[in-house]
Image (tube, rainbow, N blue to C red):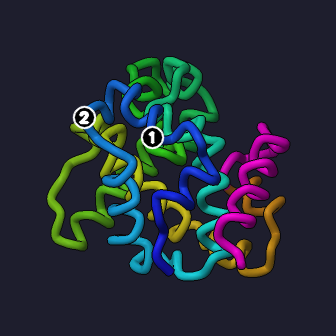
């Protein structure tokens, strides 16, 4: 299935303006975003209208319609304690939380996730050390491709296949924060993509 610019605008009316407003994606375009989706979608199992709709709904909410590719919060909450450890950060106060805070259109968080995505890239011939350059996930290629990888790695396509948006949301968010917003984007995406 080919994603079009018109489909994205139907789901995220502010996407084009937001890409240009984001300091990490300034100079990029909605066309570039769509190109990346179409180039890598099949690689990550995004092959049906339902899978695309559920994916787009989640990233629309997580990134505020592609406005943010880096978490607004400082990341200090992920720097110490049990949450830091769960995310693969060191439990000492050493800045890991800030360094590996949420980035990308699905807000990948924590040293473990950065390392896992970096390993995936290396296995596919892309030699980028995300542990040394985590800011690469905030650029349009890193933000888009890492979100698709996260969806694939966590087997979220199967929840889209069974129309289980609730479980899929919990796997992305850890809970149901922004549930109404996510449902709004899901409904727009289903209308735009599922004929």
First in sequence, mark 2 or 1: give its number.
1
Query: CA gap, disc 2 to disc 1?
Result: 11 Å
Prevailing SS of the magenta stretch: helix
Could you tell me if the residues under marks 2 and 1 are in contact, i.e. CB atoms within 8 Å?
Answer: no
Q: Secondary structure at mark 2?
A: loop
Label disc, if present, on residue 7 of the rendered structure: none
Image location (x, y in percent) of residue 83: 62, 35
Image location (x, y in percent) of residue 56: 60, 57
Quarter of the image holding residue 130?
A: top left
Instruction: Decide: is 2 above or below 71.
Output: below
Q: Specify whether 63 is left or right of 192.
A: left
Residue at the image position 54 percent from the left and 47 percent from the top: 106
Q: Nearer the viewer, residue 163 or 13?
A: 13
Extreme residue in the front direction: 6
Image location (x, y in percent) of residue 19: 41, 36
Mark 1 neighbour density, 10 Å: few (under 14) some (14–19) many (20 or more): many
Q: Specify whether 121 is left or right of 107.
A: left
Residue at the image position 27 percent from the left and 64 percent from the top: 121
Task: Tell me if I can see residue 51 in this picture.
Answer: yes
Q: Nearer the viewer, residue 9 or 87?
A: 9
Quarter of the image holding residue 192?
A: bottom right
Asked whether residue 192 is drawn in magenta, I would say yes
Q: Which residue is mark 2?
A: 27
Residue at the image position 41 percent from the left and 34 percent from the top: 100
Q: Secondary structure at mark 1?
A: helix
Q: Which residues are magenta?
A: 172-195
Q: Which residue is mark 1?
A: 16
Q: Specify whether 144 is left or right of 51.
A: left
Quadrant of the frame with the C terminus:
bottom right
């Amino acid at each position: 299935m080919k994603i079009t610019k018109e489909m994205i605008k139907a789901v995220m009316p502010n996407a084009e303006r937001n890409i240009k407003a984001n300091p990490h994606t300034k100079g990029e375009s909605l066309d570039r975003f769509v190109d990346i989706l179409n180039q890598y979608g099949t690689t990550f199992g995004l092959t049906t209208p339902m899978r695309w709709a559920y994916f787009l709904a989640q990233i629309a909410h997580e990134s505020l319609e592609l406005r943010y590719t880096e978490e607004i919060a400082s990341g200090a909450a992920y720097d110490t304690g049990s949450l830091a450890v769960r995310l693969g950060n060191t439990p000492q106060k050493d800045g890991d939380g800030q360094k590996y805070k949420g980035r990308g259109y699905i807000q990948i968080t924590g040293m473990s996730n950065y390392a896992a995505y970096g390993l995936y890239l290396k296995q596919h011939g892309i030699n980028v050390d995300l542990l040394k350059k985590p800011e690469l996930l905030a650029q349009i290629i890193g933000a888009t491709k890492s979100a698709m990888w996260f969806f694939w790695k966590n087997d979220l396509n199967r929840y889209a296949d069974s129309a289980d948006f609730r479980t899929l949301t919990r796997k992305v968010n850890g809970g149901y924060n922004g549930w109404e917003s996510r449902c709004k984007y899901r409904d727009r995406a289903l209308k735009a993509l599922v004929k």
